[in-house]
Amino acid sequence: MLTLGCAGGLGPRDESEARKIADLSSRLSWDSIRYDEGAHIELSSRVEGDVARELLKIGRPATQDLLRALEDPIRGTAAHIVLCDIWEPGVRGGSSEEAIREGDKVVGFWLSYRGLRWTWKLGEGYSADPGELSENLRRWKKRLGVK
């Protein structure tokens, strides 16, 4: 179990909230990230849908479950963006986008947001490298003093 050190063991207030957080965290996905029809991430809006918005409302008590989701290839990127919004509310920037080309044709994008990088490729959709996800978890643990 992850324990938050510097955050004073911050977690759910009660068992009911713990169950709600676990359920919401389990439902995060690539669909929790807002993107436009051109498949570009709208990083100013960052998250999409009721699941992500509810986790943002809960705030820091959702941290432990979000940390557990960081290495998941489906949930990890959305969990990272939600954690950024919880722990750094109102901070903008730290994002980039770079086209992936095959000859003259754009076939995808390298996307990054505050230290995490992932891809979107035509015909494949989104993916995040497992090594990137593990490194991102390490950075979050260090930042929050997690043991």
Image (cartoon, rainbow, N blue to C red):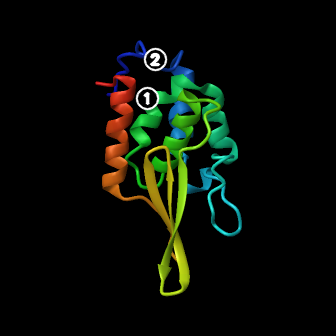
The first of marks 1 and 2 along the sequence is 2
Assign the C terminus to one quadrant of the image: top left
Residue at (53, 45) in percent of width and height: 94
Q: Position of residue 27 (x, y in %)?
A: 55, 46
The image shows residue 133 at horizontal and vertical percentages of 37, 49
Rendered residue at 61%/55% (across/down)? 31
Marks 1 and 2, how far apart at CA: 8 Å
Q: Does residue 55 appear in this view?
A: yes
Q: Is residue 137 left or right of residue 36?
A: left
Query: Mark 1 = which residue?
Result: 64
Question: Residue 104 appears at what percent x and percent y?
Answer: 53, 86
Label 1 CA crowd tier, 10 Å (few <14, some 14–19, many 20+): many
The image quadrant of residue 57 is: top right
Name the side, left or right, on which 32 lies relative to 7: right
Horizontal and vertical percent position of residue 51: 63, 42
What kind of element bears circle 1? helix
- Identity, as a three-letter code, of the amino acid under mark 2: Leu
Residue for badge 2: 10
**Towards the viewer: 16 or 142:** 142
**As drawn, which residue projects farthest toward the bottom?**
103
Residue 36 vs 55, above or below: the answer is below
Q: Amino acid at mark 1?
A: Gln
Q: Residue at x 35, y 52 (%)?
A: 132
